[in-house]
Amino acid sequence: MTFTFISRYRNETSFRHTASGQRYRLFDDGKLTVDGMEPDLDSFRAFRKWQEASHAEEMAAMRADPAKFPPDIVAEVDKPIFAKPCSWWQWFDNLALDAAETEDGKAFVAAGFSLYHTGGGCTAWSREIPDTGGCEILITNGDSGHLRDDPDDDYWVGGYNADGEGFEDLSGDGFKTAALAIANADEIANAIKQGHGVVA
């Protein structure tokens, strides 16, 4: 995916997506819009990937021959391109990437979980249960988060149907490690599968 520069006006810079013709507007406060709307996750990631690649090329050129560039621009050569959040998507994307680098996060990702936003800034690890009509497993730290931030925290595991309603008899808490939470999640998933006539 590539973009072309359109214009710079007041507090925004506009780009055109060469394939779709959509207009991407990047504001100085970091906000990104696509045709005036908040971008979906794929569009945001594609733009960020292109922006990072373009930034890297420009920084490499500055380092190779700084005399060709204005001094005030050269002074910014090592400044991170994303010093400010671009949007909600970037906040969540960075949160997911950081979480996946932790020891517990690596365990959850390896077990097929991905970070999920449950609303209001709250997060959980989510894994869909195949062939159950959209049922899923959620794992949280019991305090609307996705990692145990304190040794006294526990992981809580629950099963939910496609409407977000929990299976009251299929939940567990008090797990001090990701491994124990994942093992309980597998047990709950199997129970839900059996209830849907799926052979685990």
Image: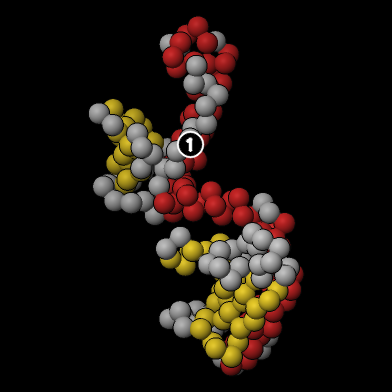
When the figure is inspected, residue 47 is found, relative to residue 140, above or below; the finding is above
Q: Residue at x 64, y 81 (%)?
A: 172
Q: Taking the image as drawn, is residue 57 in sight? A: no
Work out whether residue 132 or residue 123 is closer to the camera in this orientation and state it: 123
| Image location (x, y in percent) of residue 147 | 63, 61
| Image location (x, y in percent) of residue 74 | 49, 15
For mark 1, give the secondary structure.
loop
Quarter of the image with the N terminus is top left
Q: Residue at x 36, y 51 (%)?
A: 39
When the figure is inspected, residue 184 is found, relative to residue 70, above or below; the finding is below
Q: Identify residue for label 1.
A: 82
Q: Residue at x 66, y 70 (%)?
A: 154
Q: Residue at x 46, y 10 (%)?
A: 71
Q: Is residue 6 left or right of residue 172?
A: left
| Image location (x, y in percent) of residue 80 | 52, 31
Q: Is residue 128 left or right of residue 112?
A: left
Q: Taking the image as drawn, is residue 118 in sight? A: yes
In the current view of this chain or complex, which residue is farthest to the top?
67
Residue neighbourhood size for the residue with mark 1, other residues' Cα within 10 Å, grouped as few (<14), some (14–19), many (≥20): few
In the current view of this chain or complex, which residue is farthest to the front?
152
| Image location (x, y in percent) of residue 50 | 47, 37
Work out whether residue 123 or residue 37 is closer to the camera in this orientation and state it: 123
Count of all numbered marks drawn on residues in the image: 1
* Colouring chosen for the image of the structure: secondary structure
When the figure is inspected, residue 180 is found, relative to residue 199, above or below; the finding is above
Q: Is residue 149 left or right of residue 91?
A: right
Residue type highlighted by circle 1: Phe
Quarter of the image with the C terminus is bottom right
